[in-house]
Amino acid sequence: MPALTSKPNLFTQNQFWLGLGLLIVFFSPYLILGQDSIWYANDYAELIIHWYTLLIDHNGLWKANDYPIPGMLDTLPRGSFASEFFLKTWLFYFFQPYTAILINKLLIHTLAYLSAYHFLNHFLPDESRKRIPFYALIWAVLPFWPEAGIGLAFIPSLFLVFYSLQKGEKFSFLHALIIGFYCFYSSLNLTGLFVGFALFFYGFYEFYKSRKIKWNFWLALAGFTLIYCLFNFRLFDIYYFQRDWFIPHRVEFDIYSFVRYHDNIFIRFAEILFFGNIHAAFIPPIWYLILLGFLIGQLFSGKKAALFQPVLKVFIAINMIALLAAMLSYRPFVENIPGLIQVRQFSIERFYFLIYPMMLFSVLFVLDWLRSFKNGRIVSGFLVLVLLAYSLIVLDNNAKNYLLKPILGIGEKYPTYREFFAEAQFQEIKDLLRDQSPEGFKVASIGFHPAIASFNGLQAIDGYTMNYPLSHKDKLYTVIKDELGSDDKENWLYWHFKGWGNKGYLFNQTHKDDFMRMKWLEEIPVEKPLYNYRKLLDMGCEFILAAHPVIDEYNLEFLHKFQHPESAWNIYVYRVKGE
């Protein structure tokens, strides 16, 4: 194979700029609509945006790990927030929140395009070069999870670096730059750990075949590991070395007790292969069907294509990986493997995201191979258009909500960024609460995510994050214990909090885990939730904000209902009586 840098410079190729221009057109609605664009509260809007905002607003970037940052889950230490050695942190430092997430999104997809182009330019023959922009776009327009940075999006280039080193290429500044940048713009626990293990097994497999140690490969992998550890020093420090003052809630974390998501192995297997996942990227189901169709066609072909064996190996691998991932999150299986049930503080099955670059680039090689046949060019071109259109219309949040849902007449209306955070409405709410309690106050939320209150400058006792004090979780539990109910295995709401616990919310049996009760949905009052209001006051929580009425005249005093045309919520404000 040619060296990493032996092909013509990407930036001098006209077709490269054509594809980049098309990518900008694809995501132009986010630029045109601005805060009226759609950003899902599916482990992003309700989890991430206010998290960075609080860190920056409280000048916590370079502070010690025990530096207190108020606003969510009462007050969190600096060590519970993002590292300063993560590019996205600096986007929030230099830009306003919406601008930061917009730049982050555009960067991820631009770098995904660059990475796919880099990879394909290396492996496809010269006669395919004019088609590379369209192939690369199929990868670049996938809805990657924005919080993972380029963890998945940039894998093609990262793999190409280690592949080239394994083939004997000398280590260069370009290799170091790609590895370092990948570590700076991705997450160790979400992607880096799994990528590191995958590279280790790849290197070991190549060593087993050749019986030769490729020192450049192993030194690069050691550097990759060291850089990740240095960039994530805060995480290691607060989680493992500060137990004298910080015990993380994750010591009780039991992913296998969270039965709502882990009780059907076959559905999980199909979801991974056909639809993708929010924490990686959603994908078109046709990827799998193209690979399956190619392999079936080859079985009935007299002469096998050179592509047959590599694609067959990939197909077997992705099925095995998906099956293993499904099994590792399947309770009846895990409960019979003593070693696995002990590894309950970490979602070890998330390595499945590695199958998506394997799948897509195999599909792209198949599509390019198809063009060697008489009518293959038409079929290949049609499938490329289908894959791009699917991502544009079905997977993109704006197109799905502004175009697809109205045409088909299905699906709920989803709030825009502006409607979700409702800044104008919350300014009115803050004015009322400050009049009611001028010396300071804390709030809790029902029916909408506490992130909204935190984002708007209110100190919330509830919230959603991956690492907060166990002591605060215990306090919240004393408030919602009776409302959660028993610890029966089928009472998933109980285990949602006690077994998982990343969401420290005021759960109730009326709305369950539904904190998206927008004003255009049917109003469902929460009647006399079994909260311990005395404990709520002990935590300093004087007010409850609710998206739907909370009927409990004995414990709550209704103050005001706030409505606003630029908000997704009707907010009912209550004072906790504490009688």
Image (cartoon, helix red, strand yellow):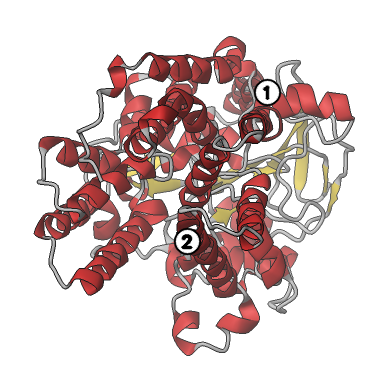
Mark 2 neighbour density, 10 Å: few (under 14) some (14–19) many (20 or more): few
Residue 244 visible in the current orientation: no
Q: Is residue 252 above or below residue 36?
A: below
Nearer the N terminus, badge 1 or badge 2?
A: 2
Q: Which amino acid does label 2 sit on?
A: Gln
User: What is the x, y in percent for residue 205?
Assistant: 28, 69
Residue 517 visible in the current orientation: yes
Identify the residue under disc 2. 309
The quadrant where residue 86 appears: top left
Identify the residue under disc 1. 419
The quadrant where residue 504 appears: bottom right
User: What is the x, y in percent for residue 67?
Assistant: 28, 44
Q: What residue type is labelled 1?
A: Glu
Q: Is residue 566 left or right of residue 114?
A: right
Asked which secondary structure carries label 1, the reply is helix
Q: Is residue 520 left or right of residue 22?
A: right
View extreme (front): residue: 302
Q: Which residue is drawn at 33% across and 17% down?
A: 13
Q: In this view, does 130 lie above or below 238?
A: above
User: What is the x, y in percent for residue 315?
Assistant: 54, 61
For the residue pair 492 and 555, the one nearer the viewer reads as: 492
Q: Is residue 286 above or below residue 272?
A: above
Front label number (1 vs 2): 2
The quadrant where residue 160 appears: top left
User: What is the x, y in percent for residue 309?
Assistant: 47, 61
Q: Residue at x 45, y 15 (%)?
A: 18
Q: Residue at x 18, y 51 (%)?
A: 165
**Number of marks present in the image shown:** 2
Q: Residue at x 52, y 41 (%)?
A: 369
